[in-house]
Each structure stands twice: as C-alpha cells, then as structure tokens.
Image (tube, helix red, strand yellow):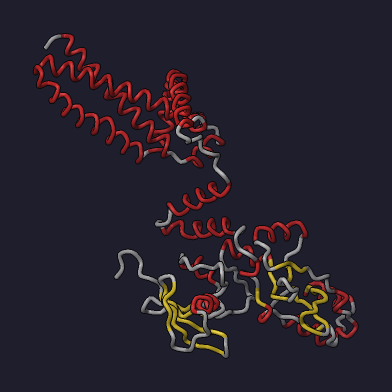
Amino acid sequence: MSDMNLLAMAAIFGLLLLLAFFGAAETALTVASKPLMHTLEAEGDRRAALVNLLYRRKERLLGSILLGNTVVNILAASLSTSVAIALAGEAGVAYATAVMTVVVLVFGEIMPKTFAIRYANRVARVIAPVMRLVVAVLGPPSHGIHLVVNGLLRLVGAGEAAETDVEAAMAELRGAIEVHAKPEEVREERRMLRSILDLADVEVGEVMTHRRTVTMLDAGLPPGELVAEILASPYTRIPLWRDEPDNVVGVVHAKDVLRALHAVGGDAQRLDVAGLAAAPWFIPESTTLAEQLQAFRQRHEHFALVVDEYGTLMGVVTLEDIIEEIVGDIADEHDVAMPGVRPQPDGSYVVAGTVTLRDLNREFEWRLPDEQAATVAGLVLHESRQIPNVGQAFLFHGFRFEILRRHRNQITSLRVTPPPRVGEV
C-alpha cells in the first residue's frame, strides 16, 4: 500500500470524526433543554450562554452544520472510492460504497446522535465553543445559500414562516408538561402547572360556591340572632340580604363583628350588624380566573358575589377558590365536609353529582370536557339530553356513568367507571 493511500485513509478517518462531530452537534443543540440553558446562563455559565446564542441564530447554525456535513460526506466518499479503486480496481467502487455506507451510518450518524440525545445538555455545552467558530467560518456561505433557497421558495409561493404566536407558545408549554407525564414523583407539580396555564380559560362560574350552599343571613333579623348565626358559621365573610335573597346589601366580616361586640361590652342587642357590612362586590360569571385573581390583588379583597347576565345571584367566589384551582383543595379546621368521591374495589368511583369536572380531571388526570357543564351531573344531563332515571347508564367520552340516586330532577350520585389504561385489560 503506497504512502498516498495511507494518507488518504488517514484523511478518511479524520473526515469520519468530523461527520460524528456534526451529527452530535446538530442533535445536541436541537434537543438541549432551552429552559435549563437559560437558567444556567442566568447563573453565569458561559457555555450555556453560547448555546443560547447559537440557538437564537438557529438558521445560520443549521445551515453551517448542513454545509459542513455535506462537504465532509462528499469528500469522504470521493477519497474512499479513490483508495478502493487503487486497491481493487473497478470493483472497488462497489466495495467503497458498501463499506462507507455502513461506516458513515454507524459511526457518523447513529452512534454520535444517540450519544447526543442521551446527554444532550452536557454535549451541547461542550460543543458550543467549537460550533461558534464553525458558524463564524461557514456562516456567510450558508447564509448566501439560505437567501437563494428563500428566493426559490418565494417563486413557488412559499414565504417565510410567521413568528411564533402566544397560542403556539402556550401549546409548547403544555407539551413540555405532558412530556413528563409518566414520573409519579412530579405528579403534583405537573397538575399545578396545568392549572396555572388554564387560569385564563376557566370562568369563575365553574369554581364558585353555588348560592344553594352559600350561607346568607337576613339583615332584618334581630342583632342578637344575627350575631349568633355569624359566630356559629364556619365562614368569616357572610352576605346579608334584605327583603329577598337576591337583594344582597352587604358582606359582613366576622372579625368586624367581634371587634364591635367587644366595644359594646358583649351586648349584641346594641350592634348594628348591617352597618358593619362592606359594600357587596358583584362580578359576572363569565370572568376568567386570571382576570379575577388580578382583580382580587388590585382591590385587596378576597370575596366576590357572582351574578349571571340577568343580574341574578349565582354564588360566591373567593381568593381561596382560585388558589385551590392551582394547588388543590386547602382544608382547614373550619371547612365543611362536602360529599365527594369514593373509589370502589372494581376501579369505579361513586361520585356526588355536585363534584366539578375540573376537580375530577385534576385529581385523576382524566380528560372529561368541562366547556358545556361544570359538574359531573351537568355533563350527564348535557350529553344525554334528558333527565335520567336511577339505574340508567351512559357511555360518554370513554367513561361509563351509572345513575345511583336522584332527588326530584337533580342527579345526586353516580358511579363513574373510567376507561382502562394502556396495558390493562
């Protein structure tokens, strides 16, 4: 074997290393976690800052990688063919094609890219300084090629893609959350992140306490009776109505009542409870949780009365209701026990009709639609288009709903059987 052939084989080996480098660089810089790199850059990591710089110039980065990869591939194929012809004659073309296909595929593509996928964040930070030099050298010619390609695309009616809009960014965030859907260790964090992203889509009417279960007092009752009712209530803020329940005249705070009671020496008959009440704050039921959370912060209030489009009182919403949408139920020593969900040995759940779909979806990571109905009973009524009888069963969205109890026209209890998970019989 001549010295020229040995030199050519050494050059081929070096070109294969370059192919592996370009393959690993393309994969690592594409797959590396952007949030992690931004965090590391904020902490002073210069290599992470280089990764972010390269990603911001993504088109020039990918153009440089593709240009370098193409040149190296063609050069390696030419040299290997030349060496193979010198060693084996005309048949060397076939030998060179077969050998280089396997070698390039395994050592220039699969191995480096697989390694880069497994250690993307680490590889990206190691490769970034070298890739910055590569982009500086190959960037101008690749940019020229990019301009030619854009011109050709315009000729066929394909312009440049528009910038990522807000909806696309939100979808990307949701996708990033769902990517980590399997580890049970981050289940609570995943649930809270989903809830935060949903604040702008959920209306207060879906999370409010319905007026049927709201504690309200008649402002016309004797002061002693009003004070007794307020002290016996588990709530600190209680709406007061006059003449009819829809005519709410104020919201009294239990702490204000206690202060006033102390000031008059404990004589409840001397109190003007209605005079202690703050003016009621009415909000439409179509207000989103994000808007209401901001309104609570601006007004420094924690309690609002929800009305429908006709001004009829629908219920109340508190700051705690919104926080619970993010972190889950917050129970304290004064909370009233509410009928909820009881798991059954067969995998089904006995659910009270008043349980909200959002609570079920958040707790069990289901996907029951909550656009047309807020509660599980409401979903059955909406989907079935009837008031079902006890014993009737329905199949909606992959779930089985069996009516267990009904009071007049209200469904009070159901058995919900979720669809089997993947891998289960």
How many numbered discs? 0
For the C terminus, the quadrant is bottom left
Q: Quadrant of the N terminus?
A: top left
Q: Is residue 196 left or right of residue 347?
A: right
Residue nearest the observer in this picture, 133 or 287: 287
Q: Looking at the image, is 263 positioned above or below residue 76?
A: below
At 42% across and 56% down in the image, what residue appears? 181
Q: Residue furthest bottom?
A: 408
Residue at (66% x, 80% y) in the render: 213
Q: Can residue 15 be seen in this snapshot? A: yes
Residue 316 point in image, percent of width and height: 70, 72
Whether residue 129 is visible here, answered yes or no, is no
- x and y, in percent, of residue 230 in the image: 76, 80
**In the displayed structure, would residue 18 be above or below residue 388?**
above
Q: Residue at x 47, y 23 (%)?
A: 143
240 lies left or right of 401: right
Q: Is residue 203 left or right of residue 259?
A: left
Farthest top residue? 3
Foreground: 342 or 256? Answer: 342
The answer to which quarter of the image holds residue 415 is bottom left
**Observer-nearest of 180 and 72:** 72
- Residue 26 % position (x, y): 38, 32
Tell me where residue 305 appears, x and y as whole percent: 73, 71
- The residue located at (32%, 36%) in the rendering is 113
